[in-house]
Image (spheres, helix red, strand yellow):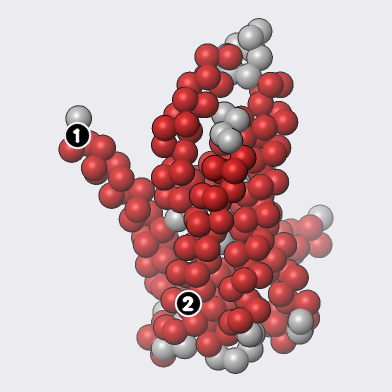
């Protein structure tokens, strides 16, 4: 049981121990980073894994020379997009089973409503969701349930994944090494989370103004 707790703690707080991971595992650290971003975006059961803060921390290490930014950014974009795609196809496959006519909570009308919503707002939703922890894990799943056209989904998935990883990775690369950031990493993480929520807050505010 203690070993399981240790492993869970390792994955939940890997953003704070990333330097130790890189020093211990060397090039395999890239694989660990890939796996965590892939799971955070690809599996609806793991939305609690670090995303924004991990990418920022990895970017900071790349800025310090411990990782290659030219390898890191494309690798994590690939992890984010492939995770999205897995989530999409899981939703697409499970959709007919989840939204059953006889289901008490998940009715067929909900599936139709979700499909209509993503037909109208899917692209914008997927890109905005990338910057909102937990929400980004469920957005591709719901898109799959709503059976959004795959070509449309893939385009917005690539755009969202590129913007997300590129923004936080390069923020870490250029600013993660500053003493004020290194000495106040917890505060920096909170700022990152606030930045993540900003697009959704702006969108909600725009919608509220139209009402």
Q: Would residue 128 be seen by someone viewing this image from the given angle?
A: yes
- Apparent side of residue 155 relative to residue 203 in the rendered image (left or right): right
Quarter of the picture containing the C terminus is: top left
Find numbered disc 1 in the image and state the secondary structure of the residue it sits on: helix
Residue that label 1 marks: 210
Image point (72%, 31%), residue name: 93
- Apparent side of residue 108 relative to residue 7 in the rendered image (left or right): left
Q: Decide: marks 2, 1 in contact (CB < 8 A)?
A: no
Find numbered disc 2 in the image and state the secondary structure of the residue it sits on: helix
Residue nearest the viewer, comparing 15 with 91? 91
Residue nearest the viewer, comparing 124 with 106? 124
Residue that label 2 marks: 170
Q: Is residue 115 above or below residue 60?
A: above
Within 10 Å of disc 1 (Cα), the crowding (few <14, some 14-19, many 20+) is few
In 3D space, how far apart are the residues under numbered discs 2 and 1 (Cα atoms)?
Answer: 35 Å
Of the two numbered discs 2 and 1 on the same chain, state the one appearing first in sequence: 2
Within 10 Å of disc 2 (Cα), the crowding (few <14, some 14-19, many 20+) is many
Image point (26%, 37%), residue name: 207
Q: Residue 140, percent across and down? A: 58, 42
Q: Residue 67, percent across and down? A: 64, 85
Image point (63%, 19%), residue name: 99
Quarter of the picture containing the N terminus is: bottom right
* Quarter where residue 150 is shown: top right
């Amino acid at each position: 049981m203690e070993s399981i707790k240790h492993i869970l703690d390792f994955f939940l707080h890997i953003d704070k121990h990333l330097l130790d991971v890189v020093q211990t595992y060397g090039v395999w650290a890239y694989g660990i980073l890939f796996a965590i971003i892939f799971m955070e975006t690809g599996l609806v059961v793991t939305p609690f894994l670090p995303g924004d803060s991990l990418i920022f921390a990895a970017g900071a290490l790349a800025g310090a020379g411990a990782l290659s930014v030219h390898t890191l950014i494309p690798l994590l974009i690939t992890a984010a997009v492939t995770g999205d795609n897995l989530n999409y196809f899981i939703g697409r496959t499970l959709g007919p089973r989840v939204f059953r006519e006889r289901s008490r909570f998940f009715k067929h009308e909900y599936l139709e409503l979700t499909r209509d919503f993503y037909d109208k707002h899917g692209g914008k939703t997927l890109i905005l969701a990338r910057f909102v922890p937990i929400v980004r894990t469920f957005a591709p799943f719901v898109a799959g349930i709503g059976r959004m056209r795959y070509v449309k989904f893939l385009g917005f998935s690539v755009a969202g994944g590129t913007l997300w990883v590129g923004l936080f990775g390069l923020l870490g690369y250029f600013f993660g090494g500053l003493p004020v950031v290194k000495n106040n990493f917890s505060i920096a993480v909170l700022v990152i989370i606030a930045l993540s929520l900003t697009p959704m807050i702006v969108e909600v505010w725009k919608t509220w103004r139209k009402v």
